[in-house]
Amino acid sequence: MAEFVDVILPVPLPGTFTYALPPQLQSAAEAGCRIVVPFGAKKTAVGLIVRIHDNQPKGIKVKDAIEVVDASPIIFPHQLVFWRWLSSYYLCHLGEVYKAALPGPMKKKKVHRGSRSSQEEQSLRLSAQTLPLSQSQGDEAILFGGQDALDLGELPSLSSAQSSALASIHNQWEKHPVCLLHGVTSSGKTEIYIHLIAEAIKSGKQVLYLLPEIVLTTQLTDRLRRVFGHRLGIYHSKYSDRQREDVWLRQLSDTPYDIIVGVRSSIFLPFDRLGLVIVDEEHEVTFKQQDPAPRYHARNAAIMLASRAGARTLLGTATPSFESYFNARTGKYGLVTLTERYGQVRLPEIEVVDVSEMKRKKLMKGIFSPRLLEAIREALQAHEQVILFQNRRGYAPMMECDICGWVPSCPHCDVRLTYHRRNRLVTCHYCGFSSQIPTECPSCGNTHLRQRGFGTERIEAEIAEMFPEASVARMDLDTTRTRTAYESIISDFEHEKTDILVGTQMVTKGLDFGRVSLVGILDADTMLLQPDFRAYERAYQMMAQVAGRAGRRQSQGRVILQTRQAALPLIAQVTEGNYDAMYAEQMEERRAFAYPPFVRLIVVYVKHRQADIADHLIIEATKALRQLFGSRVLGPDEPVVSRVSGLFIRKAIVKLESKIPISKAHLMLMDMRTSLLADKTFSSAHIYFDVDPL
């Protein structure tokens, strides 16, 4: 009889932990089940059994496990293999993957394991019948699994271009398990996805449909449910812990969902017959998890997940990431293009307004050029809708004393505080610190503090004042903190209760509104001037994507693009929709200076509450890195924001050519970290890695 278990615990520590199995637990323990174990002096933790054995650990006292939580495993064996790959590739501990993977309640002792009571189910069914689909879809999707027969007379019809693309995707999949669908905005990629999903389900397979933003799920799931009914499950952080736990347990049942639509965390769900993975808007940076670990890229992780399951992957976008496009152009991925919009609607006409020239001629004082205001007025008079894009939230990015130049800054982070007029606060967008607006400059006593720059809150206020007859709404992180908030904003705009929608990057991502005739890009320069080798790529993607929201049905739309750098080649490339020219130009630079996709990047970060210790540690880390990787190491350096939440941050960068075995390099980096943190001087420091950073 096995007497010991190896357990993963949700902690940032290496390896697994071994516990003894008391006789009363030995028959209940099974790999993949959760188990309650002692951890520390007086605490307990819920871990996951990964191995049962009879090997007595030598030289340590083994504590007894307390309780087996599950009657059967809550993960499939192949999920653990996937977790181990994530841990290895993204240079983090297996416990950190476990912590990220499971919904909150499933990492606690008391968890919801049974089905809902019949009274609760009846109540939810009745509420689902009376609520609009977008409001009821969470509980409705959880309650009803994929049991209804698939009716193919419900599939959307395809144009000849779409049908050709669908056939080409199948042809590409014969040679490449991953295919990139490069289709212009409003070319009808979603209809192609629906046909592919239907084919996968008909052949008895499951589908994972990944989206970069929660905001996109509302429109998309309504469209998918019209075709696939309650075969569809939804999984993202705006749903409650209970709802996410229910989706997880449903996937382990005899009636799992055939389709899961969700954001990056959906890759962790149990799939026992995965056949198709769709990554929509594959270029989006929000697919990359930043903090905490694992700092994975959901697109790349999903490709690996599909590969291990023998599934096909489709990456869809109008503006491919350079990495994906490079892989497609060099034959690693298949490539299918859609160059015309559905219904042969022309791409929007993009008009560039040179803000510098307008201000030099004193034709423009504030945020809006006369040309943009004229276009807004024309759209409103024609009962059409307008989207205004600015990739900064808040009222003003900063406040400044107009005498001495003092700027309010965060006491915990090296960033300026952003002014939010609605709540009369200046706020740090990194740590959340807020304070009242200063009435005078603490440096010189001046009471005249002026606002510098503009964010979405200011745009909303000023445009509402200029067009009092119009209904204006704003969509950014400040206004979409709950699921119902963003659903309400989208629903109101979709049903034409809102005339003008002001937003950040959220409005650039695949939303489909039929009466939007005008898009205003208010400040292209904030995207172009970022200190990042990807700045032009991202700027092109955001501008092209938001421009694509205009004129999506019967008529050609218009875009007014305001910039102080009208002569930049990138502006012409956006205006002409010339992605290939932008790609070719930027790839020449990346090849010359050895940046992705020609090399892999790994950023080594150190954090400490004392700046001198952080400086000392990064110097020592860089020395060690150079001994391992030579001239491939850049640094040491400070990131743009070098202190967050009281922790000083330093970094070094490792560039690895594709010929270098990645697994060997990762092992060397982990050993280096262990060696450095063994020094008492650095024992309270934190060293972590960002693999393939964005």
Image (cartoon, grey):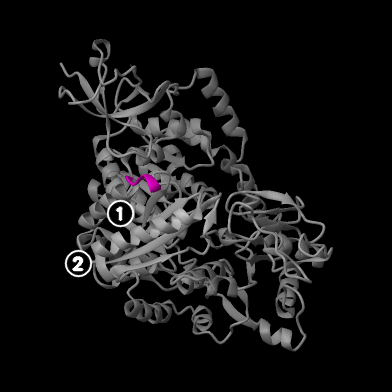
Depth check: 323 or 59 in front? 59
- 125 with respect to 615 (left or right): right
Q: Which residue is mark 1?
A: 303
> Residue 3 location, x and y as percent?
19, 18
Residue at screen point 58% across, 49% down? 431
Q: How many marks?
A: 2
Q: Residues within 10 Å of mark 2 (few under 14, many from 20)?
A: few
Q: Is residue 229 left or right of residue 15?
A: right
User: Closest to the observer: 365 or 381?
Assistant: 365
Answer with left or right where residue 502 lies relative to residue 281.
Answer: right
Q: Is residue 182 above or below residue 579?
A: above
Residue 204: where, in percent of width, then height? 28, 41
Q: Main secondary structure of the magenta part?
A: helix
Does dot 2 land on a helix, a strand or a loop?
loop
Q: Is residue 240 left or right of residue 469?
A: left
In the image, is residue 235 above or below residue 586? above
User: On the rendered image, what quadrant is the N terminus found in?
Assistant: top left
Q: Quadrant of the C terminus?
A: bottom left
Q: Is residue 681 magenta?
A: yes
Q: Mark on residue 659? A: 2
Q: What stretch of residues is rendered in magenta? A: 678-682
Residue 562 visible in the displayed image: yes
Q: Secondary structure under badge 1?
A: helix
Residue 431 marker: none
Is 141 magenta? The answer is no
* Label 1 Cα neighbours within 10 Å, binned few <14 / some 14-19 / many ≥20: many
Residue 206 x/y as whole percent = 32, 43
Let me know if residue 280 appears in the view: no
Q: Residue at x 48, y 74 (%)?
A: 536
Distance CA(mark 1)–CA(mark 2): 21 Å
Furthest residue in direction top, as rendered: 24
Amino acid of disc 1:
Ile
